[in-house]
Amino acid sequence: MSNAQPRKGSLVSRMGALSRLPLPMVRGLGWLLGQALYVFAVGRRRVAMVNWGLCYPNDTPAQRRRAVHTHFVRFAQAWLDRSWLWESPDSVVRQRLRLTGHAEALAGNTPTVVFAPHFVGMDAGWIGLTLLQPRRCAGIYAPQSSAAVDAWMAKGRQRFGDPLVVAKWQGLKPLAAALREGMPLYLLPDMDHGMNDSVWAPFFGTPVATLTSLPRFARLGRAQVVPVISRMTPSGYDVEVLPPWEHYLTDDVTADAARMNRELEALMATMPTQYYWVHKRFKTRPEGQPSVYR
């Protein structure tokens, strides 16, 4: 991991300053940033509009614009919230995070894969699990292009609970070993990474390239799958632990991936504007079909 120090006035140092502000002020700045992103991030706004239209085709154009506008605000607020998640004192973070739902599903030593979809509060969910429950967790980390930002993000994500954070380039073996040793594996498999390690499975009725890492890790570790979603609230985040999926694994990895997508659709319905709409979830297309983002 890089030991590079952030420059004075850089993004990292500014986020450190934000961590000392009251939460309403951080959220207010996030609201302003969200307005600017909605106006100026034209490409990402279009991606979000297309995604929303494919998933909720019955919404009117006005409803879609309002939803995407709200999403940009939530996206920006969640980004600025990383300041206090990674920099504020332990006591402040504890005040702003609540572990809710079926926390007993994470008790004991049962091998567990945590299904953590890309809601804007995904980093709050990780911090909540590493801070508010006793088991040591494992997760995957994508190194950043900026050495200073990379060091800041890595340090922030490892500040509680001595988690095992494995870079993507290190491969799957350390994660598989951690899962067998009883560490819950925090997995975010709901993105389009092309057809490598993916299958075609429906998502809101459209075939999408769906990663098979969730069923494969569950099978490899003989693990239960426990969904965890992180809901932004006025006071911080509710990190909600849902019951383990029953009868999940089958002999058909495509069916297992399709089940994951169906479960995700139901979770998105509980807070649709907090899902990560700016990702090109429908980027990979069946042969001969044009891009939906043109």
Image (cartoon, grey):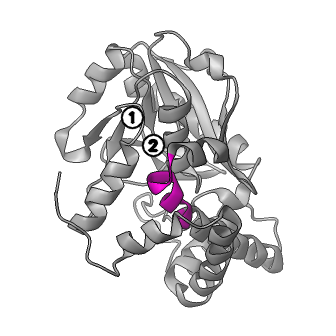
Q: Whole-percent x and y of residue 148?
A: 25, 66
Chain-order first, disc 1 or disc 2: 2
Q: Whole-percent x and y of residue 56?
A: 74, 61
Residue that numbered label 1 is attached to: 213
* Residue 235 among those drawn in magenta: no
In the rendered image, the vertical position of residue 159 relative to residue 87, given as above or below: above
Name the residue at 43% across, 66% down.
16
Numbered badge on residue 173: none
Q: From which residue to which does the magenta span run?
A: 79-89
Name the residue at 61% across, 17% down.
105
In the rendered image, the vertical position of residue 26 relative to residue 198, given as above or below: below
Residue that numbered label 2 is attached to: 189
Asked where in the image residue 198 lies, by quadrant, the reply is top left
The answer to the question of whether label 1 and label 2 lie on touching residues, with beta carbons closer than 8 A, is yes
In the rendered image, the vertical position of residue 194 relative to residue 260, given as above or below: below
Q: Amino acid at mark 1?
A: Ser
Comparing 224 with 100, the one in front is: 100
- Local crowd size for mark 2, using a 10 Å CA cut-off: few (<14), some (14–19), many (≥20): some
- Local crowd size for mark 1, using a 10 Å CA cut-off: few (<14), some (14–19), many (≥20): some
- From mark 1 to mark 2, how far is it between C-alphas? 7 Å
Q: Secondary structure at mark 1?
A: helix
Residue at the farthest bottom position: 40
Comparing 274 with 231, the one in front is: 231
Asked where in the image residue 189 lies, by quadrant, the reply is top left
Name the residue at 58% across, 52% down.
121
Q: Is residue 14 left or right of residue 38?
A: left
In the rendered image, the vertical position of residue 291 relative to residue 159, given as above or below: below
Name the residue at 44% across, 37% down.
187
